[in-house]
Image (cartoon, helix red, strand yellow):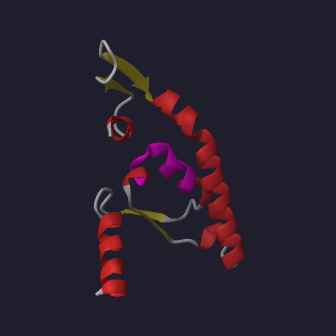
Amino acid sequence: MQVEGAKIGLSDAETVMLGLDRLAPPENLRVERAQFEAAIGGLLDNIDATVLRLLDDAGVAPEAVDTVFFTGGSSGVGLLRSRIGALVPGARKVEGDLFGSIGAGLALDALRKFG
């Protein structure tokens, strides 16, 4: 949970302190956004490739995308947003509920499937 908090914090701040209170003695680790972005770079490369493959499979040119809807916690990561934005540069960026929409969607799907 602390790592998730650090990820969220790095969306707005250049550095966050990650409390490692389970260590003996407890430690605080300073995490910089640049470290985080370097760590997720390979994952973002995979996301870029997936988005481009999706557009190609759908026969949609990146320039034809008019809106990108960001939802879910990881969509708050600035580097992810900028990379997606670069793939579809003309698209309007719309933000959903970053922390509740995925759970709400799963609940609605469960209601639909199981009553």
Residue at x 61%, y 58% (from the top left corner): 87
Residue 75, above or below 21: below
Determine which quarter of the picture holds residue 14. top left
- 42 vs 115, left or right, is right
Percent of width and height locating residue 48: 63, 55
Magenta stretch, residue numbers: 75-84
Determine which quarter of the picture holds residue 97. bottom left
Question: As rendered, which of 91 and 75 lies closer to the eye?
Answer: 75
Residue at x 60%, y 55% (from the top left corner): 47
Residue 34, above or below 113: above
Residue 95, above or below 23: below
Q: Which quarter shows the N terminus? A: top left
Percent of width and height locating residue 73: 37, 53
Question: As rendered, which of 43 and 83 lies closer to the eye?
Answer: 43
- 73 vs 89, left or right, is left
Residue at the far top in the pictured view: 25
Residue at x 60%, y 46% (from the top left corner): 43
Tally of marks: 0
Indicate whether residue 79 is drawn in magenta: yes
Percent of width and height locating residue 6: 36, 35
Determine which quarter of the picture holds residue 108. bottom left
- 43 vs 13, left or right, is right
Q: Main secondary structure of the magenta part?
A: helix
